[in-house]
């Protein structure tokens, strides 16, 4: 009988624990009881000591619908329900699963490829928008054009950034011409009932972890004892 990969087993069991939590509090998840004894944090510590790799439980997000489906998608799955990019898509609707699940999978595939930063423009991080506005203002200033023209250039650049990075306004990767919001609307019309893309989550392995920048020459010298 093949030995179960301990890291995969930990991920699966921790996911089961997370599904029983009433919030997306990672610290509460770590403190929760782990199947077989101890806590999630205890098991993680033992895994790190055994495997010798740095592992962290960093993020969790719950998406739900009152009526509809939550469609999962794993891009390039390394094992059942495990991979480097995982997506959940929440579709609220009276339509049946035969309509919602294929639509949800296509949207999830889009999300995996297009990496939206928020569901809509209003949900985009305002610090990020401020940085984009600053960059756009600097570029506009270099143009030497009148102030009122520069202001329009800045607004245009910020609006484009928002459009390109908000899921509902992104161009659907499946046809490269239709905004995602319109894809959902058209699917609702075809089904004879409204469909709402309520929420989504996209997690990518290692995303958001600051990688240490090292001097390769210094590393080689240190390894050689120089």
Image (cartoon, rainbow, N blue to C red):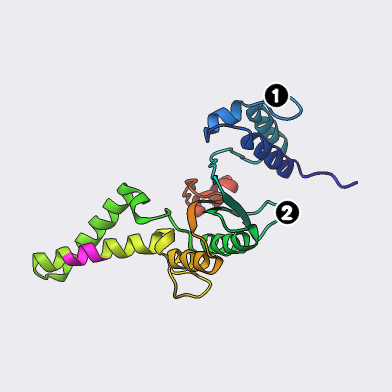
Q: Position of residue 128 (x, y in %)?
A: 33, 51
Residue lying farthest to the front in this orientation: 192
Decide which of 19, 112 is in the foreground and name it. 19
**Which numbered disc flags the more N-terminal residue, 1 or 2?**
1
Identify the element where label 1 is drawn.
loop
Judged from this view, the residue extending furthest toward the left is 146
- Looking at the rendering, the stretch of residues picked out in magenta corresponds to 152-156
- Name the main secondary structure of what is drawn in magenta: helix
Asked whether 123 falls inside the magenta stretch, the response is: no
Task: Give residue 146's position: percent from left, percent from top.
Answer: 8, 69
Q: Which residue is mark 2?
A: 79
Is residue 170 depicted above or below 204 in this figure? below
Residue 179 placed where, x, y %? Answer: 43, 68
* Residue nearer the viewer, 133 or 96: 96
Task: Say left or right for 132 vs 34.
Answer: left
Q: Is residue 226 visible?
A: no
Instruction: Say which residue label 1 marks.
Output: 38
Disc 2 packing (10 Å; few <14; some 14–19; many ≥20): few
**Label 2 SS:** loop
Decide if residue 57 is on the left or right side of residue 130: right
């Amino acid at each position: 009988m093949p030995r179960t990969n301990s890291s995969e087993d930990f991920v699966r069991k921790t996911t089961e624990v997370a599904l029983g939590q009433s919030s997306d509090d990672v610290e509460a998840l770590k403190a929760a009881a782990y199947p077989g004894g101890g806590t999630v944090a205890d098991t993680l510590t033992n895994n790190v000591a055994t495997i010798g790799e740095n592992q962290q439980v960093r993020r969790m997000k719950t998406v739900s619908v009152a009526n509809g489906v939550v469609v999962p998608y794993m891009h390039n799955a390394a094992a059942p329900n495990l991979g480097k990019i995982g997506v959940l898509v929440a579709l609220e609707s009276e339509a049946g699963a035969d309509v919602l699940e294929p639509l949800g999978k296509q949207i999830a595939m889009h999300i995996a490829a297009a990496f939206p930063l928020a569901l809509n423009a209003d949900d985009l991080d305002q610090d990020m928008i401020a940085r984009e506005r600053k960059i756009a203002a600097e570029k506009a200033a270099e143009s030497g054009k009148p102030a009122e023209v520069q202001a329009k250039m800045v607004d245009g650049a910020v609006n484009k950034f928002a459009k390109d990075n908000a899921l509902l306004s992104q161009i659907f990767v499946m046809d490269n011409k239709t905004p995602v919001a319109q894809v959902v609307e058209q699917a609702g019309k075809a089904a004879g009932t409204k469909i709402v893309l309520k929420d989504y989550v996209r997690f990518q392995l290692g995303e958001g972890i600051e990688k240490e920048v090292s001097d390769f020459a210094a590393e080689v010298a240190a390894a050689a004892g120089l």
